[in-house]
Image (cartoon, helix red, strand yellow):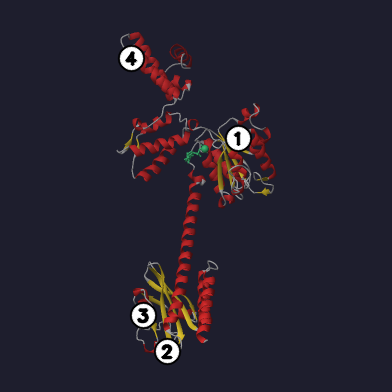
Amino acid sequence: MEILERKNAELLALFEVSKVLSSSFELKANLFQAMKLLSDYLDMRRGTITLLDPKTGELRIEVAYGLTEEQISKGRYKIGEGIVGRVVEYGSPVVVPDIGKEPLFLNRTGARIEKDKISFLCVPIRFKEEILGVLSVDRIFDESISFEEDLRVLEIVATLIAQALKLYRTFFEEKAKREELEKELKDRYQFQNIIYTSSVMKDIIKTAIKIAPTRATVLLRGESGTGKELLAKAIHFSSTRGNNAFVAINCAAIPETLLEAELFGFEKGSFTGAYTSKKGKFEIADGGTLFLDEIGDLSLTLQGKLLRALQEQSFERLGGTKNIKVDVRIIAATHRNLEEMVKRGEFREDLYWRLNVVPLFIPPLRERKEDIPLLADYFLKKYNLLYGKSLKFKPEAVETLLNYTFPGNVRELENIVERVVLLSDGEWIEAKDLPLTLDNKTKDIQNLVTSSLSKNRYNLKKHLEALEREEILQVLKDCNYNQSKAAKLLGLSRRQLSYRMQKYLKDIF
Ligand SMILES: Nc1ncnc2c1ncn2[C@@H]1O[C@H](COP(=O)(O)OP(=O)(O)O)[C@@H](O)[C@H]1O
Ligand SMILES: [Mg+2]
């Protein structure tokens, strides 16, 4: 009968311990409860959990039931030291039937003054091959209970503790990793990572910083690669919404039917293939920012649906009836001329005004050349670091960049710098190393020049004309086709240049 009762108590204790260990992430409190349960159910006094710090190799009491704070603070050992230290060293349990007779028992905590009657049981806390610490209990010496029996229970408890510890540590390691990533993301998209010196950009950033903390809708305009998305992220991450999601969706990249489902989500069965229900971007962005990229590519139907959602701050999922309310800040972007589109009836005027609360126009890079050297340097540092190089620009390379038109804007400049860093082995980047893709106009001109020069090789007048023509073209190109500037550089009046362009370049201009 007694044995049966004891068995029941053991089972109950194990059940309660496993429940308490998985109840929350309050590790210390849970471990303490577990020790208390052992004491209550199994009449074990003083339970301690000693954990191994893998970095220092030190063992320290993490939790103890039946010891004072002061006694706990003294509970420190090294691997191999005392009984606790040996259990860690050998990875196997130790039983001391009578601690009064055991010289290895250090009694470092000073807790045991009634030494004679106490047995001490100690088992490793092990996860797979790794020893995490030691579970030990004191028990009043009682001949009717075998130590094997107690050890068996303790080993099960130690396994439960090991799993809880592992879970807890993984959880917090991952949490720390996640937080670090989030911080990195935030750092990367701060305003200080937007590089500029031109006064147009200064004005844009000034406005952007001012409106960032508000909920105002922002409409970013500018050619592809000018930094619209970068600016949208900086606005998001510097607002209080920065702790919530930044959700981007490219309206030009997704077919219309899918786009609606992507934006508003859908209920199970709302269309063929909708086997589950799914949140849309509006719901995911709740509390954060929704970046609607290439808004000018939205179909008229979807423009209407978007407008309704924006006006009402709510919507229904596809195939759903429940009205879903969200708190979302909208930042839209486009390279298209929305005003023209409104005139042609391709973009809803009401939506245009709804989005156009804070319009920010980012000019193409060729219209803010002051930013080019700064950006080139910034990307050079970035890719030098990434590819372990220490390249520098020769002044004429920077000059070449300054004269280039960058149809792909900052994105193209970044690609150019990355490629040149990747491909160059020397110390200097020269103009000829720059992998500039000639824009079409420049390419046509280049071809015309070479062909006319070689064709007229043996006719002095024609050859000189071809040379003059080449010179004018080159200078025009260098001045980004600014004719007044080119005229000045060529030492011609504006009218003389005009005349020569008529004569030589009718086919191009
Ligand atoms: N002023 C800037 N400073 C630093 N990087 C920039 C700047 N403008 C653009 N970039 C970079 O150029 C690339 C293209 O920018 P992005 O924001 O995607 O342009 P868009 O959305 O206008 O097409 C990105 O890698 C971005 O980080
Ligand atoms: Mg973009």
**Mark 2 CB in 8 Å range of ligand 1?**
no
Q: Quadrant of residue 330?
A: top right
Sooner in the amino-acid sequence: mark 3 or mark 1 = 3
Label number found at residue 82: 3
Position of residue 301 in the picture relative to residue 46 (left or right): right
Which residue corresponds to mark 1?
Answer: 298
Q: N-terminal of the two: label 4 or label 1?
A: 1
Mark 4 residue element: helix
Q: Is residue 27 above or below residue 281?
A: below
Q: Amino acid at mark 3?
A: Gly
For residue 454, which numbered disc appears in the image? 4
Q: Are marks 4 and 2 in contact (CB under 8 Å)?
A: no
In this orientation, does residue 185 appear?
A: yes
Q: Which mark is residue 115?
A: 2
Q: Are marks 3 and 1 in contact (CB under 8 Å)?
A: no
**Residue 53 in the image: x percent, y percent?**
40, 69
